[in-house]
Structures are given as structure tokens and as C-alpha cells.
Image (tube, rainbow, N blue to C red):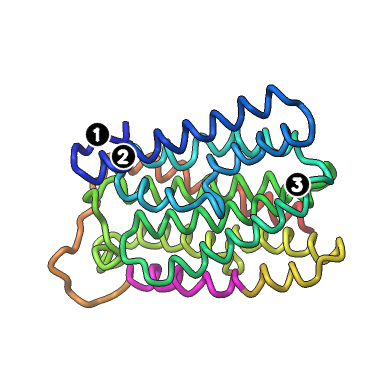
Amino acid sequence: MITKSKNIHAFEASIKYIIISAISSALYLLGMLTLDYIGLLFINLAILIKLGVSPFHLWVADIYEGTSIKVLPILALLPKIGYLVLILKLINDNINILLIIIGLISIIIGAVGALNQLSIKRLLAYSGISNMGFLIIGVVFYSSNSLALPIYFIIYIINSLIIFTIVINLKDNLYINDLSQLGINNPYLALLLSSAILSLAGVPPFLGFWGKLVIIYNCFYSGWVFLAISLLFFAVIATFYYIRLANILFNNKLLINSIIIIKHHFYILIILSFCFIGCLITSLKCLS
């Protein structure tokens, strides 16, 4: 699926993905052979490699960039559901510190690495790294009595689906300036896209804000004050590139590569809009 674009970047992305998958599978099988502490560590490392969190993130941006935009949602979102459920089952006190360090570094790299990105694909890659960092930390402080982690993950999936559904109709190598004047050409799509972007950023009162707020609160309540402050600090840094992208949508400056939205995914966007509103209502009820 990755080589669907049939260019040198797609070929490079496919080779890297095959190598990463082979390494991850080898570690997983090795861990299954020795079901002790070391085996559990290998299994978790295999899962973390597939999730693309730091320090195993180096392949993510290149594979995102080389993959066709029509295939990217499957590659970026679908595997993460199973891997996060699996790592939630394997969590124990022996690896909590390791997961916290990996999650925090992922958030830092995702926030800082995206600041100078102009490609939408690479921007989404670093955004995914950052959000996976939040989810990993959410896994560590997960409580069966709390809906914070599943709600945050559902919010992340819905926001990502909204963004992918919109940009999937555009040219494959999309840059942030190509989204200029979308607010003029199609205000509804621009409003929906900017809402999803700001939600990923964690800007109140959008959905992502409540998810990140609960995870940060759980860290603070568990006595990890420095971790909670660090999460808040880098979440604020990440908002800069999200807000920059949202601002581009309503930029009045004429660009040569201004884009026109194809309408055959309009009904999908309507459904996702209702999901977006439903998650907002659910989040507010769970937090009240």
C-alpha cells in the first residue's frame, strides 16, 4: 500500500517500514520465548516501536511523507488501536518509569520537531508522536474507574479522521500554505478542520483540551508534579504550530497553489462532525 505512489520517496518509506516491522516482530517473538521480566521488556519495546514513540520515532516522519495520502490514515491510525490495548494489558510497576520517560521524550520531540515543518504529512507525523506520548503516560496512570484514557484516544482518532478525510481530497504532497483561502472557498470545511486541529492542540474548550487536562491532573494527583508541569509546558509549545496551521485556513493572501475541495467525502464529514459533537458532550458529562 505504501508504494502506491510509485516514486522514490514511496519506495524509501516502504523499505523503512519493512525493516521497522521486522525488528519489532523479532523483539516480540523473542519476548514471547522468555516470559519473564526481560521478555516483557522486549514485548513492550516491540509495541513502542510500532507506535512510533521516542526514541523509536526516527522512521515515522519519512514513512508518513513517502506514503500516499489515501493510504496514510490506515497506516497511521488502525494499528495503534490494537497496540495500545495490548500495552495496557502488559503494564506493571517494573516498566512504569520507562514508559513515563518515553512518553515525556515523545511529547518533547513531537512539540519541538513540528515547529519548523511545512509539509502536512510530516506535521501530522510529529503530532502523532506527541499524542502517542500523552497516551503512553495516560496508560501508566490509567484507572479502571476513569474514562480519561479511552476518551482521549477516541478524541485523537476522530480528530485525525477529520483531518485525513479533508486532506485526502487534496494533492498528495501538501504543504500548509496550500490550505490558504480554504476558509473563503469552503467555510464549513475550514471551520471543521480548524476545530480538529485546535482540538489536537488541546486548546480549550475543544475536545483535546479535556483529554490532556485529565491526564495532566492524574499525574499531579499521583504526586508527579514535575511531570505534570512538563506536560503542560510542552503542550503549550505544541499549540504554536497548530494555531499557525489553523490561521493559514483563513489567510486572505492569494497563493498560486490554492486548493479546491472535492465534495465526494462530504457525507463522511457530516458523520464525523456529529461524532465530534457527541464526544464533546460525553467529555463534559464525564468531567462534571
* Magenta residue check for 245: yes
Q: What residue do we see at 33% from left, 37% from top?
A: 15
Camera-side mark, 3 or 2: 2
SS at mark 3 in the image: loop
**Mark in front: 2 vs 1:** 1
Q: Position of residue 58 (x, y in %)?
A: 45, 53
User: The magenta stretch spans which residues?
Assistant: 234-249
The residue labelled by disc 1 is 4
Residue 13, by quadrant, is top left
Could you say where residue 231 lies in the image, as x and y percent from the top left? 67, 67
Measured in 3D between alpha carbons, the distance from the residue under mark 3 to the one under mark 1, in whole angstroms, is: 38 Å
Q: Label 3, on which residue? A: 147
Question: Is 190 drawn above or below residue 255 in the view shown?
Answer: above
Report the number of numbered marks. Answer: 3
Which circle's residue, 3 or 1, is located before the other in the chain? Answer: 1
User: Which of the 4 quarters of the picture holds residue 117?
Assistant: bottom left
- Asked whether disc 2 touches disc 1, contact meaning CB atoms under 8 Å apart, the reply is yes
Q: In the rendering, which numbered label is found on residue 231?
A: none
The local secondary structure at tag 1 comes to helix
Mark number, residue 70: 2
Q: Which SS class for mark 2? A: loop
Which kind of residue does numbered mark 3 sit on? Leu
For this rendering, which residue is in front, 31 or 212?
Answer: 31
Residue that extends furthest to the left in the rendered view of this protein: 256
**In this rendering, is residue 173 above or below 40?**
below
CA distance for labels 3 and 2 = 32 Å
Callout 3–callout 2 Cβ contact below 8 Å: no
**What's the amino acid at mark 2?**
Lys
